[in-house]
Amino acid sequence: MLKSSASRDEILNYLVWVRTEYIGLGEKGDPATNADEVVADKAMKIHEDEQ
């Protein structure tokens, strides 16, 4: 997703899906948490720094 220039919201939505539906932590449809936002921001920063 990072290589295809996904937006922060797209990455954040994916992380929420992984957490709630794939891993099963929380309920389906739960909003993004601060932890989800931190991970999305850090992943984007790492990817930007590698460019």
Image (spheres, rainbow, N blue to C red):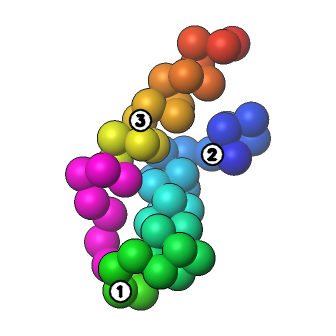
Relative height, residue 48 to residue 44 (above, below): above
**Which residue occupies the foreground of this view, 6 or 24?**
24
Q: Could you say which quadrant of the image residue 16 lies in?
A: bottom left
Relative height, residue 28 to residue 13 (above, below): below
How far apart are the alpha carbons under marks 1 and 3?
Answer: 23 Å
The image shows residue 37 at horizontal and vertical percentages of 34, 47
**Which residue occupies the foreground of this view, 4 or 23?**
23
User: Residue 42 has which mark?
Assistant: none
The residue under label 3 is 41
Q: Residues within 10 Å of mark 3 (few under 14, many from 20)?
A: some
At a point 24% along the width and 51% down the height, the residue shown is: 34
| Quadrant of image for the C terminus | top right
How far apart are the alpha carbons under marks 2 and 3?
Answer: 12 Å
At a point 54% along the width and 52% down the height, the residue shown is: 11
At a point 69% along the width and 46% down the height, the residue shown is: 1
Task: Decide if residue 5 is on the left or right side of residue 39.
Answer: right
The image shows residue 13 at horizontal and vertical percentages of 48, 63
Q: How many marks?
A: 3
- Give the residues in magenta: 30-36
User: Residue 27 has which mark?
Assistant: 1
Amino acid identity at mark 3: Asp
Task: Decide if residue 45 is on the left or right side of residue 38.
Answer: right
Amino acid identity at mark 2: Ala
Task: Decide if residue 42 is on the left or right side of residue 21.
Answer: left
Farthest-out residue, right: 4
Helix, strand or loop for disc 3? helix
Q: Earlier in the sequence, mark 2 or mark 1?
A: 2
Amino acid identity at mark 1: Glu
The residue under label 2 is 6
Helix, strand or loop for disc 1? loop
